[in-house]
Amino acid sequence: MKKLLLFAVLLIPIFCFGQKQNKDDIIKNWLDTGYFKIDDDNIVVSKVINDVQGTKDEIYVRIENFFTRTYNDANSVIQTDNKQSGTIIGKGLFMLNYMTYSCFHVLRVDIKENKVRIICSADVMNTHSIHYPSSSADDYKIVDYYPITNKGKFIPKSSQAEAFIRLIKIMHTTIDTVEKTIKEGAIKGENDNW
């Protein structure tokens, strides 16, 4: 029994190191494959959707509907809404995990006939005290700290890596939701055939 317990204790560092390495590998692979890009101080995820059905005005209304439904709280705002140029830009807040990390982002959608470009960018991560969630956040530029650099920020690097991975996943989910809204409408039954 003691040998089994000793063996289990010896495996703990192996599993802990393996998880850290796995996060680093995920982030490196994503950067190498263009799953996200670094543009000056911004982390950027983007997508161009071709062969979008409908006129530029019809597509615009669908995207405007997405922003109206999604950017509807005090932390979210539509900053630019220009139907003529086909550009809508919103600023919102991603909650990356419960009371610890959040990140403001900018979502830009550009519309042309049968074509849409979606760009989601973020530059500052906000950390909140777990013990005092109502206290002010400590902000830091994402590109200046781990996992983009090896520099830590008063918190474990593994936590920073987890928050970064969550950010990239949420950015992609947001873009996928915009695409779905463009193609299917924001809710079931919300289409032109009524």
Image (cartoon, rainbow, N blue to C red):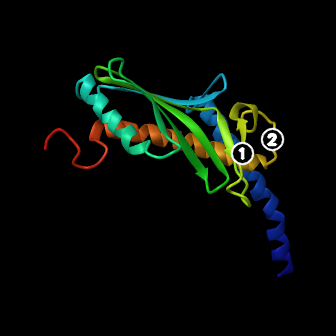
86 or 134: nearer the viewer: 134
122 or 74: nearer the viewer: 74
Asked whether disc 2 touches disc 1, contact meaning CB atoms under 8 Å apart, the reply is: yes
Q: Position of residue 75 (x, y in %)?
A: 53, 43
**Callout 2 amino acid:** Gly
**Callout 1 amino acid:** Gln
Residue at the spot x=47%, y=43% of the render? 173
- Is residue 77 depicted above or below 83 in this figure? below
Can you identify the residue that label 2 sits on? 152
- Is residue 97 depicted above or below 173 in this figure? below
- Is residue 134 depicted above or below 108 in this figure? below
Q: Residues within 10 Å of mark 2 (few under 14, many from 20)?
A: some
Residue at the spot x=70%, y=42% of the render? 24
Residue at the spot x=79%, y=70% of the render? 8
Can you identify the residue that label 1 sits on? 160
Q: Position of residue 28 (x, y in %)?
A: 67, 35
Location of residue 190 by image quarter: top left
Residue at the spot x=40%, y=42% of the render? 177
Q: Position of residue 102 (x, y in %)?
A: 62, 46
Q: Residues within 10 Å of mark 1 (few under 14, many from 20)?
A: many
